[in-house]
Image: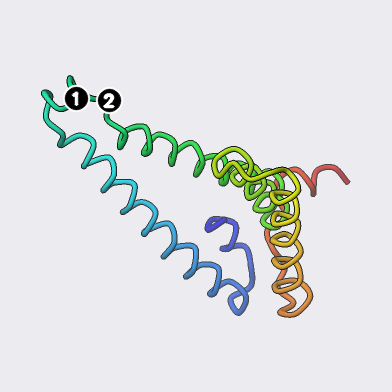
Amino acid sequence: MLWASFGLSRASAWVPQWVLAITLILLLLQLARELLAALNTSAQTRMQAPDGRRKRAVAALIWLSMLLLLTWLLGTAPGGALFCCAWLRWHASEPWPVSLAIAAGLGIALWLLFTAFLGVGLYPGALWPNLG
């Protein structure tokens, strides 16, 4: 998404570039902290009990990769909504109606805020432009 924002005009690119850059930096710092904490545990502790930090770090990498893939393929609003639905259903164990309702609300809110109110086009994804 950050890479795609460089194709926008100068006036509409600065908000996504700053927000995405700060978000990516914070996510990478958190991930590095989790991985370093997992690596710093002693060998004796690893032998006694399984290390939950490593599992959480791997799970975070998988979920983050899925968000990036869905956003790249489907675009910002549909990819974010689909990711939200998957995360709520399988990670947070929410029931299907709640997961679908929140994901639909997120997709509609993203579209309304950026496209309808601000007039800034969201990243359309790699899949949608090639279908038409």
Farthest residue, direction right: 132
Q: CA distance from mark 2 to mark 1?
A: 6 Å
Point out residue 117 in the picture as x, y percentages from the top left corner. 75, 80
Type of amino acid at the residue the image marks with label 2 = Pro
All told, the count of numbered labels is 2
Q: Residue at x 44, y 61 (%)?
A: 23
Say which mark, if any, is on residue 108.
none
**For this view, does 128 lie left or right of residue 93?**
right
Q: Secondary structure at mark 2?
A: loop
Residue 28, horizontal then vertical, whole percent: 36, 51
Q: Quadrant of residue 101?
A: bottom right
Neighbor class of circle 2 (other Cα within 10 Å; few <14, some 14-19, many 20+) is few
- Identify which residue is drawn at 73% across, 43% down: 96
Residue 121 appears in the picture as rendered: yes
Q: Would residue 72 be seen by someone viewing this image from the given angle?
A: no
Q: How far across and how far down the image is residue 83, in percent?
A: 63, 46
- Residue 94 versus residue 101 in the image, above or below: above
Q: Are marks 2 and 1 in contact (CB under 8 Å)?
A: yes
Q: Position of residue 7 (x, y in %)?
A: 62, 62
Position of residue 110 relative to residue 31, above or below, is: below
Q: Residue furthest top?
A: 47
Q: Nearer the viewer, residue 11 or 121?
A: 121
Nearest to the observer: residue 130 or residue 37: 37
Instruction: Please tell me which residue is depicted at 67% across the width and 47% down the height of the picture.
Output: 85
Q: Would you place residue 114 above or below residue 45 in this image?
A: below
Q: Residues within 10 Å of mark 1 (few under 14, many from 20)?
A: few
Along the viewing direction, whichever of 109 and 2 lies nearer the viewer: 109
Residue to which mark 2 is pinned: 50
Reading the image, the residue beneath label 1 is: 46
Which residue lies at the image location 15% right of the left edge and 34% below the top edge? 41
Which image quadrant: the N terminus?
bottom right
